[in-house]
Amino acid sequence: MAKPKSLQFKPDLEEATKHWLAFWDQELLDRPCCCIRAPKDGVKAAPGPQYLSGAREDFNGVIEKILANAESMWYGGDAVPSYTPSFGPDMISAWLGADLEFDPNNFGTNWVHACIEDWDKSLPIRLDPNNKWWRRMLDFCTALGEALDGKMVVAHLDLHSNMDTLSAMRTPARLCMDMMDIPETIDRAMRDVRDLYIPIYDALYNAAQMYKYGTCGWVPAYHPVRTNTIQCDFAALIGPDHFKRWVLPALDEEADYLGHCVYHLDGPECLVHLDDLCSIKHLDCIQWTTGARNKEFINWMDLLKSIQAKGKSLWVPCNVDSIKVFHKELKHNMLFYDCWAPSQKAGEETLKWLKANT
């Protein structure tokens, strides 16, 4: 179906889409792809809902805050207004039988209670359509799709699929031991989890009506049809051989289905897998995340250049000052800037600067 040319909070969506399509093809138009956001001129700031609110509060109140916040923001350049529904970092494991625990005084995170004690009793792994957390997420996505229709995009979810799912269901330490002790069982478990990725992705995609306007992943890269951010944080705990056996094939399948996607590369412990990640055909972009207590993103320039040299584009978080440093050092057709500006005027001036210096 034909895609709309504008959204209420993004009247120039058609122009932004041209830049995003060029980004996915590693092409360059008048400037690099740049999603830049700032407080909107003349509009009182409105905070969005707290993280995890959709899991714990009435949907209507959450949606009111989403819309109020979006209306108070300027979405400049290629920034597409979006909201990512989330019940925390281990949602798939909760949909498959683990349970989530919330701190009543802290909306910043939650915890998952592992549910696999005996693999033989737990396999095959299946999605129960009546699972309470699955039903609530489908209901939340449906409510978001209806309320945000024509205004902004419902972004796809931070799924923590593939081996991250097994890690949460079994615990990381026990899964590490299982990979050594009963690898054939982990083969079976991974086949089950991999088979669920597309049905889960599509059910959420359809519930939120993402097909109407395209979507972002939780990293704000937009595609007019389908995309997401994929990952395997568990990869920090395993070496290349185990990564190639269990993780790489799953990521390759996810990327192939999405067609275009970003990979969340979290911390130096995962860099041992970089070459394997860069071999994934439909993985277009790396979101390098430095990890806690490490040097700031801008000080990893050698790594960023090496990723581009391996043929993959970059997510580049920046502000109106640091963007000029990245612009001098990196290939313009192989990045998108995720930029925050202190004001709409500063954001507009930054976009003009990019055009003049590209």
Image (cartoon, helix red, strand yellow):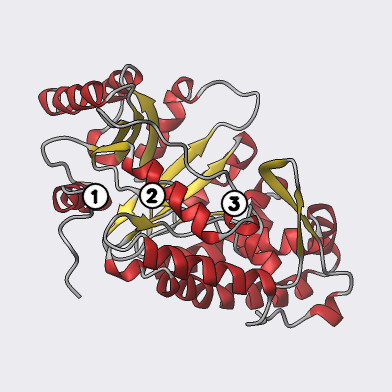
Residue carrying label 3: 53
* Mark 2 → mark 1, Cα distance in angstroms: 24 Å
- Residue drawn at x 74%, y 70% is 186
Residue 235: x %, y % from top left: 65, 50
Instruction: Say what amino acid the circle numbered 2 marks.
Output: Leu
Residue 244: x %, y % from top left: 60, 59
Q: Are marks 3 and 1 in contact (CB under 8 Å)?
A: no
- Compare residues 177 and 50 and report the one nearer the observer: 50
* Mark 2 → mark 3, Cα distance in angstroms: 14 Å
Residue carrying label 1: 20
Residue 95, which numbered label?
none
Instruction: Say what amino acid the circle numbered 1 marks.
Output: Trp
Residue 209: x %, y % from top left: 36, 70
Residue 60 visible at all: yes
> Which badge, 2 or 3, is on the more N-terminal residue?
3
Classify 10 Å Cα crowding around label 1: few (below 14), some (14-19), many (20 and above): many
* Mark 3 → mark 1, Cα distance in angstroms: 30 Å
Q: Quadrant of the C terminus?
A: top left
Quarter-of-image position of residue 50? top right
Q: Mark 2 against mark 1, which lies toward the viewer?
A: 2
Task: Reply above or below: 176 against 80.
Answer: below
Q: Is residue 186 left or right of residue 311?
A: right
Residue carrying label 2: 67
